[in-house]
């Protein structure tokens, strides 16, 4: 699958970010309010320094009874996360996510996060590509009966 992460899978957008000293409680509230499952943590220059996910909040805060209001995201985030470049292929991204058991990966250029791609985004792209291949195969095998 040769689709590129940006713009074929996700679009570059203004990413909701937070600082390393912001609390886990703030992260949870922002993520719930925006209905997102991952939050990018940036340094003072706006460069990506980590990622906090729902899994981090659940396993490192809630399940351990840690005070979310007193816990900085820097204590629970994945520091220096693996990232994707905008022109990486969707297939490579999906393989990395499957191998490392990630559900979200930041898309980064020049240290700045341009987007976050989820495994759901990639599965949708794979599904579309497979459906297109099926239509092309049917058109080849059966002629133009299916409007391909």
Image (spheres, rainbow, N blue to C red):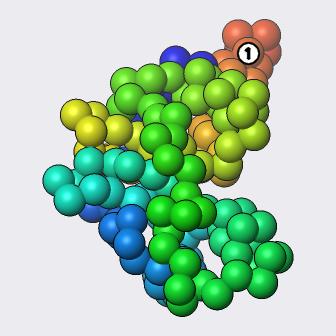
Is any part of residue 27 visible from this angle? no
In percent of width and height, residue 54 lies at 66, 68
Is any part of residue 28 visible from this angle? yes
User: Which image quadrant: the C terminus?
Assistant: top right
In percent of width and height, residue 74 lies at 48, 62
Q: Which picture quadrant has residue 42?
A: bottom left
Residue nearest the viewer, comparing 102 with 74: 74
Q: Residue at x 42, y 59 (%)?
A: 40
In percent of width and height, residue 45 lies at 17, 53
Residue nearest the viewer, comparing 96 with 86: 96
In percent of width and height, residue 67 lies at 64, 87
User: Which image quadrant: the N terminus?
Assistant: top right
Q: Which picture quadrant has residue 141?
A: top right
Q: Is residue 112 left or right of residue 54?
A: left
- Name of the residue lying farthest toward the right: 63
Q: Residue at x 38, y 72 (%)?
A: 21
Q: Is residue 27 above or below residue 103?
A: below
Q: Please name the residue that numbered disc 1 is placed on.
A: 137
């Amino acid at each position: 699958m040769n689709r590129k992460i940006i713009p074929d899978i996700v679009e570059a957008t203004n990413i909701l970010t937070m600082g390393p000293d912001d609390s886990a409680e703030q992260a949870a509230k922002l993520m719930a309010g925006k209905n997102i499952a991952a939050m990018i943590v940036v340094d003072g220059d706006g460069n990506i320094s980590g990622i906090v996910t729902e899994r981090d909040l659940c396993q490192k805060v809630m399940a351990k009874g840690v005070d979310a209001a007193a816990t900085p995201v820097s204590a629970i985030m994945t520091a220096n996360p693996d990232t994707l470049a905008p022109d990486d292929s969707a297939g490579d991204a999906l393989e990395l996510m499957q191998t490392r058991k990630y559900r979200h990966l930041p898309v980064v250029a020049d240290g700045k996060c341009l987007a976050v791609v989820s495994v759901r985004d990639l599965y949708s792209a794979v599904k579309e590509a497979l459906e297109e291949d099926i239509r092309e195969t049917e058109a080849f095998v059966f002629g133009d009966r299916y409007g391909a």
